Amino acid sequence: MDPLATNDIEQITADNPSPYTLRGTNTWLVGRDPCWVVDPGPAIDSHIEKILAAGKIRWILCTHTHMDHSPAAAALKKATGAKILGRPAPAGQDASFAPDEVLSHGERVSLGGVSLRVIHTPGHASNHLCYLVEDTRMLFTGDHVMQGSTVVINPPDGDMRAYLASLELLLGEDLAILAPGHGYLIGEPHHEVRRLVQHRLKREAKVREAIAKLGEPNLAEMLPLVYDDVPPRLHGMAARSLTAHLQKLLADGAVRAEGERYRLAT
């Protein structure tokens, strides 16, 4: 079965819009009888009902275990007996997520005649996976690549160094189209991935510039300089990614920390 050629792919967006989720979390369904689900989404009854109405579900795959992506898996399994695949939740994430099969990087799984290859892409979440349909070169990206926005990298589970390395990993893959966890299908995958890498590196450069300008600032002091292009109402969210940038710069040896203040390394 070729999901793109036969149009046996459906996007159902959960009714959970927010600055983090944009217009909502995407659940992707491939096939009809049987079908498989990528990212069942939040445990919203109306959303679960739409998924159940789409086809006979035999497999449920989760890209990661943030609360807008995996909680509906348990209800879908209870209703259908479907097998859940993914990686266990780190502390503080979806405690209800219990995969029947734990997936590893490079592993191939066959779902209703479709071959998927698992790509471990930590950064946004340490257990984040992308799923590549090898025949069509469609990649289900979860929150590793979103359409219309960048993702928050929220330590301690979020890791900017790992995120950039995971983006670089995708540049070595033969990709045709991206099916993200938020937004719409994305064409020109390598162009989009390079754009995200450059965006993060430009933000990192602004962190260095802010430290150089302010001397030995704390996070709150450099935040309005580093995110001067982001509305103040979103600065709480931006502070999480700024923390991740600072941790990367500390690990790189480019910045030193003294208490809550930062300075450039000589």
Image (tube, helix red, strand yellow):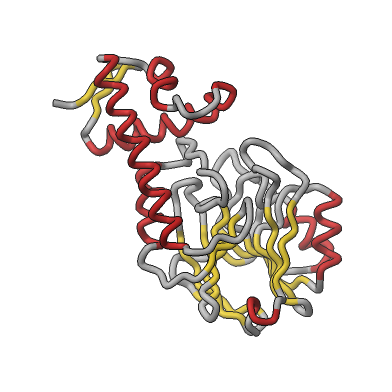
> In the image as oriented, which residue stretches furthest toward the left?
266
Q: Position of residue 60 (x, y in %)?
A: 68, 65
Q: Quadrant of residue 256?
A: top left
In which quadrant will I find the C terminus?
A: top left
In which quadrant will I find the N terminus?
A: bottom right
Q: Position of residue 239 (x, y in %)?
A: 47, 27
Question: Residue at the spot x=63%, y=82% of the render?
Answer: 2
Q: Position of residue 82 (x, y in %)?
A: 74, 69
Identify whether 19 is placed above or below 72. Answer: above
Question: Residue at the spot x=50%, y=68% of the render?
Answer: 118
Identify whether 175 is placed above or below 205. Answer: below
Question: Residue at the spot x=51%, y=77% of the render?
Answer: 134
Identify whether 245 is placed above or below 2. Answer: above
Q: Position of residue 136 (x, y in %)?
A: 55, 78
Q: Quadrant of residue 9?
A: bottom right
Which one is nearer the viewer's eye here, 16 or 108? 16
Q: Is residue 68 left or right of residue 179?
A: right
Which one is nearer the viewer's eye here, 2 or 160? 2
Question: How many marks are shown on the rendered structure?
Answer: 0
Which one is nearer the viewer's eye here, 95 or 144? 144
Question: Residue at the spot x=40%, y=35% of the render?
Answer: 244
